[in-house]
Image (tube, rainbow, N blue to C red):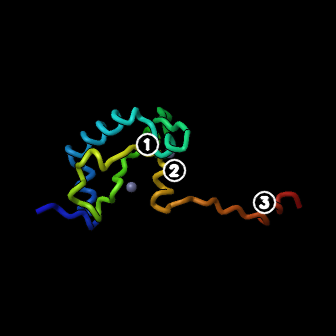
Amino acid sequence: MNPQYRTLEQKRKFYDSQAWKQLREEVKDRDNHECQECKRNGLVSIDTNEYSETAKRKKIALVVDHIKELEDHPELALEIDNLETLCVSCHNVKHGRVFVPNVNKWAADERWD
Ligand SMILES: [Zn+2]
Ligand SMILES: [Zn+2]
């Protein structure tokens, strides 16, 4: 029987596993450390070595994504053909987590009063 990845705890365990960490690096190597979605759109998004002061670690530019989601397809969790490298913004778009800055026009205008 395949393991399930439904709860946060189950997912955390998976993403912490040695098998995943190894495979994740293999996928990034296979994809030349380039976002595959950007590539499909004729753009290039590669990994950065920028350091984030606030997070106290290297900025994460690339993630390795499950094409068929882990939750729905636990049997494909470690299937290299089900994995691809995405940049953080493409990954957010894929999952509908688009960050729209809340620009408050009036607050900005006030400065000029
Ligand atoms: Zn991208
Ligand atoms: Zn994903």
Residue density around tag 3, few if under 14, some if 14–19, many if 20 or more, within 10 Å = few
**Quarter of the figure with residue 3:** bottom left
Left or right of 74? Residue 86 is right
Left or right of 37? Residue 67 is left
Q: Where is residue 8 in the image (x, y as percent from the top left)?
A: 29, 64
Query: Circle 1 sits in a helix, a strand or a loop, which is it?
Result: strand
Q: How far apart are marks 2 and 3 (CA)?
A: 26 Å
Of tags 2 and 3, which is closer to the observer?
2
Q: Which mark is residue 108?
A: 3
**Along the viewing direction, whichever of 12 and 83 lies nearer the viewer:** 83
**Along the viewing direction, whichever of 92 and 72 lies nearer the viewer:** 72
Left or right of 18? Residue 41 is right
Q: How far apart are marks 1 and 2 (CA)?
A: 9 Å
Q: Position of residue 93 (x, y in %)?
A: 51, 57
Q: Which circle's residue, 2 or 3, is located before the other in the chain? A: 2
**CB of mark 3 within 8 Å of CB of mark 1?**
no
**CB of mark 2 within 8 Å of CB of mark 3?**
no
Q: Which circle's residue, 3 or 1, is located before the other in the chain? A: 1
Residue density around tag 2, few if under 14, some if 14–19, many if 20 or more, within 10 Å = some
Amino acid type for the residue under numbered disc 3: Ala
Q: Which mark is residue 89?
A: 2
User: Which residue is outermost to the left?
Assistant: 1
The correct choice, above or below, for 51 with respect to 103 in the image is above
Q: Which mark is residue 62?
A: 1
Q: Is mark 2 within 8 Å of ligand 1?
A: yes
Amino acid type for the residue under numbered disc 2: Ser
The correct choice, above or below, for 26 with respect to 105 in the image is above
User: Which residue is outermost to the right?
Assistant: 113
Q: Where is residue 16 in the image (x, y as percent from the top left)?
A: 25, 50
